[in-house]
Amino acid sequence: MTDVTQRSARRTAADTEPMVLAFDVVVTAVRDLTPTFRRITFGGACLTGFGVVGDTLDLRIKIVIPSEGRDAPDIAAMMSSGDASGWYQRWLGLDAADRGSMRTYTVRESRCSGPRPEIDVDFVMHLDAHGRGGPAAEWAAAARPGDKVCVIGPNASAAQCRTAGAYGGIEWSPGLAQHVLLAGDETAVPAISAILEALPEDIGGHAFLEVPDGQDIRPIRSRSSVQVTWLPRGDRPHGEHLEAAVRDAVRVPGWVSLSGRESANGGGEPEDVDIDRTILWETPQLLETAIVRSTVNPERPPGTQPFYAWIAGEAAVVRSLRRYLVRDVGVDRKQVAFMGYWRKGRAEQA
Ligand SMILES: Cc1cc2nc3c(=O)[nH]c(=O)nc-3n(C[C@H](O)[C@H](O)[C@H](O)COP(=O)(O)OP(=O)(O)OC[C@H]3O[C@@H](n4cnc5c(N)ncnc54)[C@H](O)[C@@H]3O)c2cc1C
């Protein structure tokens, strides 16, 4: 299986290379960062073929967790046989026990260009008093060095070519904005941390991270002047602190005043999203990534800065913040990424 993965990664016809590859990785380290976060490091020679151009930011991957006592399915073989894009249907067609469970995670850190390529993923340990949670959380709780999973992620070699925008695993796209808002719960902490670490000096704004407990607060290194606020939840409802913080920080329409003196004018009601049936995922047009940061935007009112917001976490909380920002504040939807990372009471569908 590793051979198939490596063969795929070595292909050189850039335009025809798959954007996504399956990497058969092995757990090389397990470390509890805080009561909520467990960092699992994955390694393997195949990871030399993993990566994107530039910072990983909020890069998402899929992890295929094998069923107990089974090997991970051979996704690399499914990708290399027949129509490459049909691998997902082929995987869905397997018996449930052979299929395992596919879940979405963020690459907290990638070190794939060195002699021992590795990626770190920070798992939220959402387990009940009996140690029961979803397949991913339960797998992470029991993970030991040597355990194997399959990671589906970007093909570094395809990412180098000009047509590489298609991977689509990175949503952070602030365009010209120098004033940003990042808001998320614990599942978004890995992404927000990686984004903050990559931001340059001239970016300001706010980052709000709601976490279960004060012990989950960790230092984040950032050259930016974004003000980072941790919001330990304690016994308050999920999202309560996050919503209050965002409402307090954003009271003006899409353009954020340097002086902070603008008044709010509302926008339209965003169409409702049935978060129990579909994924809430609304992000600005990819075109924004093509904007050169030094370009002068002719529509920008004097004395203001373009604004960009990135919001992720439990879907009901994200939906409520979407309604507030779009309807009540009037923020242009092209300036905000709203992402339901998980839905309370519902397993990720895969
Ligand atoms: C783009 C993206 C990036 C993500 N990055 C990360 C990441 O880096 N780290 C991370 O931990 N998660 C991350 N998530 C969230 C993660 O995919 C979900 O939490 C996922 O449901 C976990 O799978 P599971 O098998 O443990 O639980 P599932 O089988 O999906 O769910 C089982 C039950 O657990 C509940 N549940 C799921 N997640 C949580 C939670 N966090 N807290 C409380 N209850 C929960 C569900 O509502 C359901 O009732 C990300 C999601 C997306 C879409």
Image: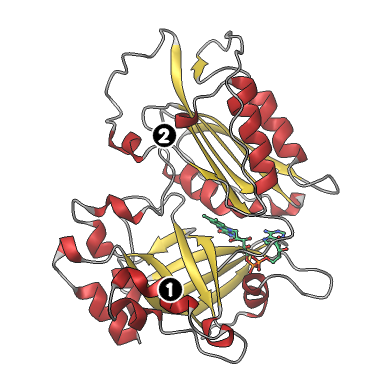
Three-letter amino acid code of the residue under disc 1: Gln
Q: Looking at the image, in which quadrant does ligand 1 appear?
A: bottom right
Three-letter amino acid code of the residue under disc 2: Pro
Q: How far from the left and from the top, in percent, is residue 243?
A: 71, 35
Q: How is the image coloured?
A: secondary structure
Instruction: Identify which residue is drawn at 33% across, 61% down.
Output: 51
Q: Which residue is mark 1?
A: 89
Q: Is residue 6 left or right of residue 169?
A: left
Is the C-beta of the residue carrying label 2 under 8 Å from the nearest atom of ligand 1?
Answer: no
Q: Nearer the viewer, mark 2 or mark 1?
A: 1
Dot 2 crowding, Cα within 10 Å, few <14, some 14–19, many 20+: many
Classify mark 2: helix, strand or loop: loop
Instruction: Identify which residue is drawn at 15% across, 69% down.
Output: 12
Q: In which quadrant will I find the C terminus?
A: bottom right
Instruction: Identify which residue is drawn at 53% across, 63% down.
Output: 104
Q: How far from the left and from the top, in percent, is residue 73?
A: 46, 84
Q: How far from the left and from the top, in percent, is residue 78?
A: 36, 80
Q: Which residue is mark 2?
A: 174
Q: First in sequence: mark 2 or mark 1?
A: 1
Q: Are marks 2 and 1 in contact (CB under 8 Å)?
A: no
Dot 1 crowding, Cα within 10 Å, few <14, some 14–19, many 20+: few
Instruction: Identify which residue is drawn at 58% across, 74% down.
Output: 30
Q: Quadrant of residue 132?
A: bottom right
Task: Give residue 79's mark.
Answer: none
Q: How far from the left and from the top, in percent, is residue 323?
A: 64, 31
Closest to the observer, 32 or 251: 251
Identify whether 62 is placed above or below 329: below
Cα–Cα span, label 2 and label 1:
34 Å
